[in-house]
Image (cartoon, rainbow, N blue to C red):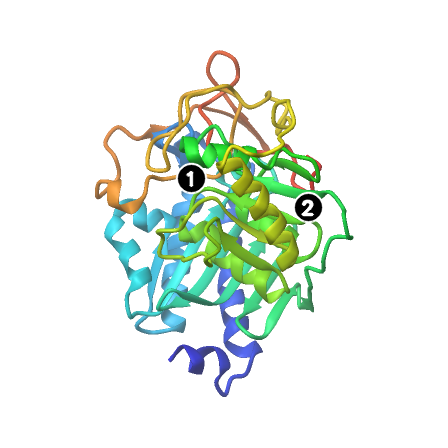
Amino acid sequence: MIDDFLYGTAGHTGPTADVEAAVRAAAAAEILPRHRKLAAHEIIEKSGPHDLVTAADRLAEEHLTAALTKLLPGSVVVGEESVHADPGLYDALGGDALVWIVDPVDGTRQFVRGEAGFCTLVALAHHGEVHASWTYAPVLGEMAVAVRGRGATLNGTPIRSGAPAPGAVLNVAMSHPDYTTEEQKRALLGLRTDGIAARPCGSAGLEYLAVARGAQDATAFNWEYAWDHAAGLLLVTEAGGAQSTLSGAPFRIAGGNDLPFTAGRDEPTVQRVLAALRAGADGAAGTTAGAMPRPHPVGSPPSAPARTRAGSPPSAPGWSGPRQPRPPSERSRGRRPGTRAHPLSVRPNILGLRLQADEGVPRCRCSTRSSWGPGPTG
């Protein structure tokens, strides 16, 4: 059925164009009207101020769910917000149904701050394999589409990831090592070595797009939620790139991966990043001294206790990134009691967060940058 949908008589552009239209429509109806115009009641804390959901997230996912299941009757949607409400939905990734994997707003913190560095991610998967993906950055005006075996395009133009110059320093966007297990922290710290310029990541979807278009060399992430990675990993590989988990096995969207994992412009780049991660994990990395680069004007990453992948981020100021809900197996069904509107100060077209004491909030594994651009700057 998936072959008929993607490769049937409608041709390469028919069904994929319909999905692209649905993604654009959801953004136009539910996301863009709220960009820099969110009211206080439209931002809700889930597990805490580091874990936000907005009206745009919820309504865009509802919009996409209706549109995508209409395009492909019998399909199901595994979306970030729907799984938060019903963790059992995540199991569909390993089932027989055709699955739409949806992150309505990837980079919610950037969206809340009124920045451009967020996107909508949609992927179509079957039996754990991703067959097509759509990455849409509405403020940046960029739509990237990938179809397995048919390449990747950006705004209709084919893109290739290319390869770094021989011996060049690799620009790598990475998870912050403080908020993970001790073993994964050691692995990520292996990227602080000669030949690699590592920086905190922004929106995962836009980091993957930067790799696919050759504007960035690689990513290194230590969380595995399918809605953050399914679309981008296909985009990178169809643009000529490669990906691998720490063990050397391909990333599995259903989970159970050996973390961290990496995606890069080509196979040699992936192997260089893996070598650094493995050296870090083994305690043999020639790491350089110094803190991570400053990701955002609010300050450098804090010193904070390490966290496990299943736990909650520590309460520490000065670090921000994609929302990281707990794995489906550990989330209770339904919205947690005690969720509340996030404190905001709203003026026309200007959104300012009223933060606690030192203008900081508990942050997750990746950074929020004041403006997004491909590559290591920001």
Q: In the rendered image, which residue does mark 2 sit on? A: 374
- In the rendering, at what x and y percent does residue 209 appear? 61, 54
Q: Nearer the viewer, residue 63 or 289?
A: 289
Crowding at dot 2, Cα within 10 Å, few <14 / some 14-19 / many 20+, comes out as some
- In the rendering, at what x and y percent does residue 160 appear? 69, 63
Residue 24 in view (yes/no): no
Q: Is residue 355 left or right of residue 288?
A: left
Instruction: Specify the quadrant of the image occupied by residue 239.
Output: bottom right
Q: Quadrant of the N terminus?
A: bottom left
Q: Quadrant of the C terminus?
A: top right
Crowding at dot 1, Cα within 10 Å, few <14 / some 14-19 / many 20+, comes out as many
Q: Is residue 160 left or right of residue 74?
A: right
Q: Secondary structure at mark 2?
A: loop
Q: Tell me the kind of residue under disc 1.
A: Thr
Q: In the rendered image, which residue does mark 1 sit on? A: 54
- In the rendering, at what x and y percent does residue 337 appear? 23, 31
Residue lying at 53% horizontally and 66% vertically, measured from the top left: 20
